[in-house]
Image (spheres, rainbow, N blue to C red):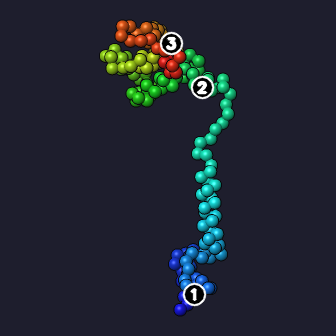
Amino acid sequence: MRHTPVTVKVAYAWYTNERNGLPRVLRFYTGIDPLLLALLIFLFLFAGACATPVGVKRIAPRAVHRALTASVLSANTLSNPTQNVFYRRDLFARFEDAPEATLAELHAEVAADRGGRDDICALAELSFFYAENTGKRPYYLAAVVYAYTFLFPGEGHHPPDPLRSGTA
């Protein structure tokens, strides 16, 4: 029994195997053999799997150090630990809209002993950042007080370890 070509989908058709007369599927109208097509798909997938998902770019050590240790003092930008405090407490938008209220809220958290040492360090940096951008002198004093509190925490607390990353 011989089958006549019938379109299954737009790009596929039945055709008869010349050797035994059985119908086979997946002969493209473009003339590409299904085995060759499978081989091409496998090669493209294999080539894509060999590519690295992450690229590496060589950067000068000084540039890397400068980027990792950037702060208000060195680059007029907030440091990574301060940005982490902002993310954890969801303060970015509030600090842009009402910086004084945000500083007061973070101060209240630290004063109520609900904040950690990283919050005190962030308060020092944020107060200095705000003072530098607005020229309001009381915030310079607040930055000094917070920095002193961070460096000399008092009884039961240990001063920061300068050899540990992110504590100084």
**First along the sequence among labels 1 and 3:** 1
Residue 41: x, y in percent? 61, 63
> What separation in Å lies between label 3 and label 2 (alpha carbons)?
26 Å
Amino acid type, callout 1: Gly
List x then y, in percent, for residue 130.
48, 17
| Three-letter code, disc 2 | Ala
User: Crowding near pointer 3: few (<14 within 10 Å), some, many (20+)?
Assistant: few
Residue drawn at x 43%, y 29% is 87
Classify mark 1: helix, strand or loop. Answer: loop
Q: Position of residue 134 (x, y in %)?
A: 50, 16
Q: CA distance from mark 2 to mark 1?
A: 70 Å
Name the secondary structure under disc 2.
helix
Answer with mark 2 or mark 1, whichever residue precedes in sequence.
1
Discs 2/1, front: 1
Neighbor class of circle 1 (other Cα within 10 Å; few <14, some 14-19, many 20+) is few
Tag 3 secondary structure = loop
Quarter occupied by residue 121: top left
User: Could you say which disc has been placed on residue 21 in the image?
Assistant: 1
Q: Nearer the viewer, residue 101 or 149?
A: 149
**Does residue 91 appear in this view?**
yes
Residue under label 2, please give it.
67
* Label 3 or label 2, whichever comes before in sequence order: 2
Q: Furthest-bottom residue in view? A: 1
Q: Is residue 102 left or right of residue 73?
A: left
**Mark in front: 1 vs 3:** 1
Q: Which residue is labeled 3 in the image?
A: 135
Compare residues 23 and 142 and report the one nearer the observer.
Answer: 23
Quadrant in the picture for residue 27: bottom right
The residues tagged by marks 1 and 3 sit, at their Cα atoms, a distance apart of 90 Å
Residue for point 66% across, 25% down: 61
Identity of the residue drawn at 62% across and 41% down: 55
